[in-house]
Amino acid sequence: MTHILAIDQGTTSSRAILFDAGLKVVSSAQQEFPQHYPQPGWVEHDPADLWATVAATTRAAIEKSGLPARDIAAIGITNQRETTLLWDRATGHPLHNAIVWQDRRTADTCTALKDAGHEAMITARTGLLLDPYFSGTKLKWLLDTIPNARARARAGELAFGTVDSYLIWNLTGGRTHATDATNAARTLLYNIAEGRWDADICALLDIPMQLLPDVRDSSADFGLTRADLFGHEIPILGVAGDQQAATVGQACFQPGMMKSTYGTGCFALLNTGDKMVPSKNRLLTTIAYQLDGKPTYALEGSIFIAGAVVQWLRDGLKIIRDARETQPLAEAADPAQDVVLVPAFTGLGAPYWRPDCRGAVYGLNRNSGPAELARAALESVGYQTRDLLEAMRADWGVAAEGILRVDGGMTASDWAMQFLSDILGAAVDRPVITETTALGAAYLAGLKAGICPTPAEFQKSWALQRQFLPQMSASTRDAKYARWTRAVAATMTV
């Protein structure tokens, strides 16, 4: 058994990638699934779509490889975080659509909790802020809304989980109800200092603790898959939320190392080692990974809209047919125009945390067109990343390496990565393997299976594909970033 299968369940698609013992890709499969928007600011997934696309892509990746399932030593799972599911323990049937991490329906609940003075306690214990982003208030909404759900939860009839737990439940035929520390740390219910579910917070939100999954290391035994799924039982040995998995895949094992992943959203993590660093700049304190019962902590900044702004150009404005068209458009944009797009389609994330904000465009003139909007869309991702790194520097100091490691779909754009380096005034390193989320999940599973090397040895295998260095003058950089900060300030006043 020399291969590792990574399941990467994301916000808009599910993928399965089969790696060999050297963590080289053997085969892969991917499927998109529909997004559901019942009301403005609400985002849902059909749980059946999540499970069906995971099962289908996993089977497809195995079939493409030509390998029998018995050759797979382990499965690693990585997933969209905070997305919240509630299901019946007896039947496995979900009681409601999954409420996606982008969903803002619990904004009023969060405001009420803040007004009642609870945020300081919650932040001290969980490292998180009171925002609709996290799972806890989503779960409260489900229990408040679904008839008899809270009573059934107290009776032990229901199970809560983020996407990883739901997949583990289905893969193991309901034999395992578990999560890992990185996903637990995103629920608003987990005390990251003490490593346990927090009874006080659960009581505050009226969440019966019988609902909650067992919390394990990121590299641990999560049970065996049903034999009928893939023709052979396969152990699930690694689990991590997508951004933490990318941190592992980028080999950011030393304090001070930073990575930023550009998918639907953008998420920057700074490894702070065994030290929990409370943020004074509205970043999140979270768990980067947990091995042998010992958590490694991180500061995290979350941007809700990164790659999704390109999807908006394609599906909303219909000015492109493919994401690759944004680079030539950006290159053709009029340099004399200073169009700024603030993509607060589902609110502003870190360091602003304004769920009430909505997107805005500034600086339009009669000659502004698709090229200028495409450039502004790509630039918005760089500006938001600088917002995060400015806050990180204030909390932690200048990072040890002063280098940002990047991954995810948007990093394929040389133009976007060059602008990122320019606006940060820092080196941006793109690795040979940019799909580091799946790589991190595979590594965690392979580590438990005894196939993959120690973190120190794995770190040596990280390979640079291209480094982007700043080419923009400091005066231009400062002027452009000042324009961005004014645009954000204006957006928050609307």
Image: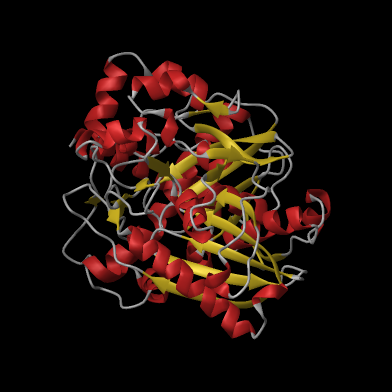
Q: Residue at x 16, y 64 (%)?
A: 366
Q: Quadrant of the N terminus?
A: bottom right
Q: Quadrant of the C terminus?
A: top left
Q: Is residue 187 visible?
A: yes
Place residue 6 in its image quadrant.
bottom right
Place residue 201 in its image quadrant.
top left
Residue 73 pos. (x, y %): 72, 66
Q: Nearer the viewer, residue 56 or 389?
A: 56
Residue 487 pos. (x, y %): 29, 42
Q: Nearer the viewer, residue 483 or 430?
A: 430
Q: Residue at x 39, y 38 (%)?
A: 135
Q: Is residue 36 above or below residue 244?
A: below
Left or right? Give the position of 149 relative to 51: left
Q: Is residue 147 above or below residue 59?
A: above
Q: Is residue 296 above or below residue 463?
A: above
Residue 245 pos. (x, y %): 60, 52
